[in-house]
Amino acid sequence: MKSNLDLATENDNFPYLEDDPEHYTRLVSSYYTFHLQDSNATVGYILPWVVEKMPWSSAWTIDHKQKRITPRPRYYSLDEQNTVIAETLQEARARGIFKVLKGWRDELYPIYGSAAQISLERAGAALFGIVTFGVHMTVYVKTTEGMKIWVPRRARNKQTYGGMLDNSVAGGISTGEKPLDSLVREAAEEASLPEDLVRKDAKACGLVTYFYIQDERAGGETDLLQPECQYVYDLEVEEGVVLKPGDNEVENFSLWSVAEAQKALAEGQFKPNCAAVLLDFFVRHGILTAENERDYIEIIARLHRKLPFPMA
Amino acid sequence: MKSNLDLATENDNFPYLEDDPEHYTRLVSSYYTFHLQDSNATVGYILPWVVEKMPWSSAWTIDHKQKRITPRPRYYSLDEQNTVIAETLQEARARGIFKVLKGWRDELYPIYGSAAQISLERAGAALFGIVTFGVHMTVYVKTTEGMKIWVPRRARNKQTYGGMLDNSVAGGISTGEKPLDSLVREAAEEASLPEDLVRKDAKACGLVTYFYIQDERAGGETDLLQPECQYVYDLEVEEGVVLKPGDNEVENFSLWSVAEAQKALAEGQFKPNCAAVLLDFFVRHGILTAENERDYIEIIARLHRKLPFPMA
């Protein structure tokens, strides 16, 4: 059985400098840093074996001494960095180099930290180790038997985390999309929730941020880096509202008591970042407290990690 | 007028390593680190001029080369470190060395990071730069005109932040006290709220953590370091419930709309950490969102700083 701290730590499993400065420094200095043209900021970490396998064209500067990777200015303008990145990932996909690119989505994720609007294909985000953004909403009902939470099970055949439990509504924010618009879209697609209900009653409740090192459940190479920022929402609904799959991403929805959700958490049934969002929900709703959770402070810290990359 | 980011940054005004590594490193390496006997952990930062003025007895090891300060084992047992610390602060108080000690409270604050139960006088916490813990509760009413918030004004003659606005209930957690018990005590003392109401309806909602460098409003020396962790609570009350001062710490209570509270925030009328707690309340209640606050991510990060000291 996993403790709540186990769950928070499995999701925020990138080491902390202060816990072991030597290990941390050795690890981070083993990565190549990914930079955009007009800024010195590190916008992602790339693993050495990814650097080795990626089909970099002459449009890139690969500095093996400084371990820096940047689109080359003389080949492309600021905005055209998008083309450099896209062509490289398309080439890698065509050659079948990385398993993660089998999950190609034709969906762009933004990269912050440059004056230009730069994006890359969602399936390639973890190869470049950039911060990705998403929306996660917990839909709940207040019943005479206490609070109940709508919990979906991911389709068994989904490439990533197949068959695991999820948050009521969750998805990634594409380039140019606002968090609330992304939420409305996902709520309709995945849970058949009407747009007007979500726009009227979904309550923004902050952020959950963490730095995740992928394991085999992510459905691709292991050890890829996934720093993430989730916009979290709550939606209280009436007893009559029923969530049902709107596409084939979700197998089914169950309406569970807090105790049932906590049992499934302890059994490790939730996708790691969904466990984190549910813990944040329990903290905000006074279900986890300083009195009943001895790791309260450490858990909350791991739900709000400061990420070492630009966020805006 | 102050932006919400200004308010979050004024409260969390200790620099961040990643913003300017050179400045940060120079600053932190100028401090003496405070250690307890049985642990290598740094439990506080002490400013050089505090080290110079403090009447250290022979019961201390003052290592000017390593800039380390530790109670000396051969003089006292683990638990007796309390005596060493208390005698030193009493001596400093008797000699009138530090202005902050004029606010002596006869109230002990815990120091974490040792196997022993170590505490020090509340008024001396910022001299040793240790993490202090508190409870802050926002009491609100849902009215036909929207949400209203109970806002107290601190007594004008209060030594610290006299005349500034505060959270509905707020106070420090003493050694041995549980957060909820501290909240119940403060709610009765400062806001005349009955214990049974608070125990039944106050909802724990997480933590706000920040690292504050004191200015003159703190009523003592400036530049003292105050890393803090606040347990935050919400209490929704009926329209008939009226908060009124229970002691002479509070001048009066007002019931304000969100817009009125936001205006007072922008005018800098709130005590800095109370502004931070109110921003966290606005984030959790969907009043501040990614859509209406362009600094949403940065503000939330500054309300959840990872402090460089043991927290448990």
Image (cartoon, coloured by chain):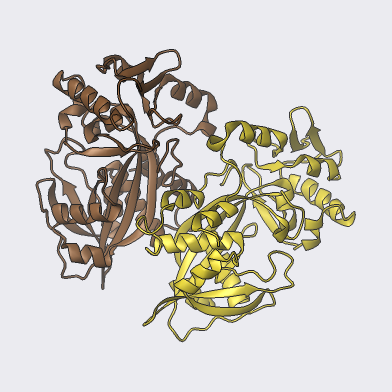
Chain colours: A yellow, B brown
Q: Residue furthest right?
A: A95
Residue A107 seen in this snapshot: yes
Dividing the picture into quadrants, the one containing residue B286 is bottom left
The answer to which of B166 and A98 lies nearer the viewer is: A98
Dividing the picture into quadrants, the one containing residue B58 is top left
Residue A93 as seen in the image, left or right of residue A144: right
Q: Residue furthest top?
A: B65
In the image, what residue occupies the spot 30% across and 14% down? B52
Q: Residue furthest bottom?
A: A240
Q: How far across and down, in percent of the image, does residue A280 sit?
A: 47, 59
Residue A288 as seen in the image, left or right of residue A211: left
In the image, what residue occupies the spot 65% across and 57% down? A175
The answer to which of A23 and B159 lies nearer the viewer is: A23
Residue A189 as seen in the image, left or right of residue A150: right
Q: Is residue B130 above or below residue A119?
A: above
In the image, what residue occupies the spot 38% across and 62% down? B285
Residue A56 seen in this snapshot: no
Q: How far across and down, in percent of the image, does residue B241 sit?
A: 16, 67
Report the quarter where the N terminus of chain A lies: bottom right
